Image (cartoon, helix red, strand yellow):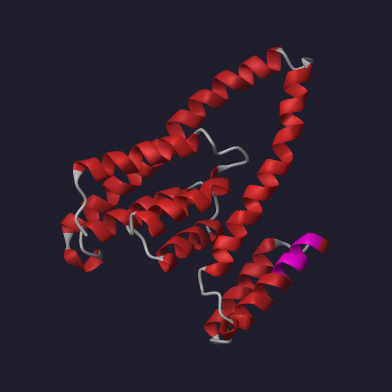
Amino acid sequence: MNMTPADWLALLTHFMSLSLLAIGGAITTAPEMHRFLVDERHWLTDSQFSSSIALAQTAPGPNVLFIALLGWNVGVNAGGGLGAGPMAWGLAALGMIIAMAGILVPSTTLTFAAARWAHRHKELRVVRAFKQGMAPIVIALLIATGLILALSQGRSLDHWRSWLLTAFSALVVWRTRVHLLWLLGLGGLVGWFNWI
């Protein structure tokens, strides 16, 4: 896969535009990232997309790190794969920097300015209404992200074990206070024994 300078610019501007829509965190924009990177541009496979998110979620630190992995994988693919040598590693680093700059700079700047303004005007009705109106939107975006990740293994009934594990995990997270790391460990164990 060859990427032109226009492609890199498209990656940057797309992530910059998503940065301004990332209410509730960058993870809420994952469905649009999937559409752009996997479905439209074919820069990533379904598996690479899901693996990037899963790996970043299991690592300590901010979950925005999945953006770095998405950019890294785009660069690796552009360079011909990790075995292609230093050029692939360089393009991977370039992809990671472009993706992170695109997702961080606009939202950080806007959040800084908006938070200062909202704090000064926190008693205004419009500020309170905005905060209350954002909650259902964030929940819907998180559900959409979960569906994309769940569907990445396929939609057929052949994957009923994956669907069962997904439903079980969602139920446990919703109804109990079990730490997420236990569920991640369970998922890793199930995958290790090739039960799904």
Question: Quadrant location of the N terminus?
Answer: bottom left
* Closest to the observer, 87 or 148: 148
Res. 91 visible in picture: yes
Q: Which residue occupies 69% across, 12% down?
A: 120
Q: Residue at horizontal 36%, vertical 36%?
A: 13
Residue 118 to residue 59: above or below: above
When asked about the image quadrant of residue 180, the answer is bottom right
Q: Is residue 189 left or right of residue 140?
A: left
Relative vertical location of residue 152 with respect to residue 109 in this rendering, above or below: below
Was residue 112 drawn as part of the magenta stretch in this picture? no
Q: How many marks?
A: 0
Residue 22: image x %, image y %?
55, 39
Q: Tell me where residue 117 appears, x and y as whole percent.
A: 63, 15
Q: Nearer the viewer, residue 41 or 112?
A: 41
Relative side of 124 to 70, left or right: right
Magenta stretch: give its range: 169-174
The residue lying toward the viewer, choosing from 72 and 41, is: 41
Q: Dividing the picture into quarters, in which one does residue 23 lie?
A: top right
Q: Position of residue 181 (x, y in %)?
A: 65, 64
Give the residue at x 67% y 18%: 118
Give the overall secondary structure of the magenta segment.
helix
In the rendered image, the vertical position of residue 127 relative to residue 38, given as above or below: above
Q: Residue at x 43, y 68 (%)?
A: 47
Would residue 176 be seen by someone viewing this image from the given angle? no
